Image (cartoon, rainbow, N blue to C red):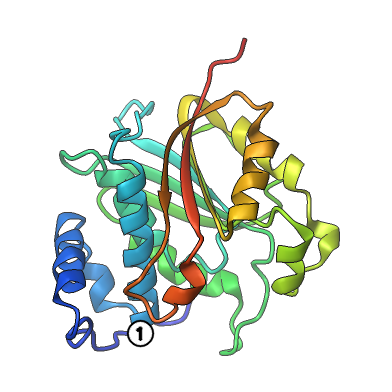
Amino acid sequence: APPLADEPKAALFADDPRAAAELAGLAEAYALAPLRARSSVVHWLANLALLRGLVRLSAAAGAPVPTGADGGVRALDLGSGDFHYAFALQRWLARSGGGGPRPVDLLGVELDGHGVQRDGRARADHAAAHAALAACDGTTVRYEVADATRGGWPTVDVATAFFPFLSAYACLQWGLPVSRLRPRRFVQRAVAMVRPGGWLVVVNQTASERAQLARLLADQPVRLLAETPWHAEFAPWAARTVGQTGTLWSRLAAD
């Protein structure tokens, strides 16, 4: 696994005290100091953006109800890329809803995990480094190269899918083969992986993909608990986040 960068962050938000105060409070509440000390600026901001969105999304729903004998939460992240956000996701799973940190068993799954990055290492190599950093507070964080539409993992308390490809246009924009696009099967599998009463979290790039998600979930045993804009106005890539939406769904019991 590659070493994780420690880029200076002291000057971030120097001209935006409101954002600085909000994000500093978030970093303190979710104990992000280890991430701050071992992350690039880009990954630090990406984790803050993801964590802020998750906190807003679950504000009205509380915390995921654990089913583990140790009070822990089992979670599955579908389409994890290089898993650079593993730390923020783990902290949200462990600490959302207040109280002390709960144990977390988090698995990230990525179809294209063997894709080579600019430094000559594979996505899976980078993911191993991010997963190792996130494995704290009684947490197990793993990464697996696999097809989420075919996996046979045990059901979980929380499944997440950040920017899944639900249209051919999205695949083509990102240079991915349309032959791998199976949006209906992906959504069906995502729902099936969540136990009754568990949560499914999905973040979509555009309003049209959010509408497509609603159509794909229309015949699935879920109900919408919460929805929030995913705009990260403090990030250098803020323009790309306009129109992004996060939704939180509860898995219903089978009839």
Q: Residue furthest top?
A: 255
Residue 211, compared with residue 28, is above or below; it is above
Q: Residue at x 69, y 38 (%)?
A: 216
Q: Quadrant of residue 71?
A: top left
On the question of residue 150 being in view, the answer is: no
Residue 78, compared with residue 217, is above or below; it is below
Label 1 belongs to which residue? 5
Q: Label 1 neighbourhood size at 10 Å, few (<14), some (14-19), many (20+)?
A: few
Residue 226 position, x and y percent, is: 41, 38
On the question of residue 140 being in view, the answer is: yes
Residue 129 position, x and y percent, is: 43, 71
Q: Residue at x 41, y 63 (%)?
A: 231
Of the pair 223 and 1, the residue shown nearer to us? 223
Of the pair 79 and 249, the residue shown nearer to us? 249
Q: Going by the image, does 20 lie left or right of 7?
A: left
Residue 93, compared with residue 30, is above or below; it is above
Residue 125, compared with residue 6, is above or below; it is above
Q: Going by the image, does 51 lie left or right of 85?
A: left
Q: Going by the image, does 30 lie left or right of 107?
A: left
Q: Residue at x 61, y 77 (%)?
A: 122
Q: Residue furthest right?
A: 179
Amino acid on which disc 1 is placed: Ala
How many labels, in total?
Answer: 1
Q: Quadrant of residue 136?
A: bottom left
Q: Quadrant of residue 229?
A: bottom left
Circle 1 sits in a helix, a strand or a loop, which is it?
loop
Quarter of the figure with the C terminus: top right
Q: Going by the image, does 31 lie left or right of 214?
A: left
Residue 18 position, x and y percent, is: 16, 70
Residue 144 position, x and y percent, is: 59, 56
Q: Residue at x 34, y 28 (%)?
A: 65
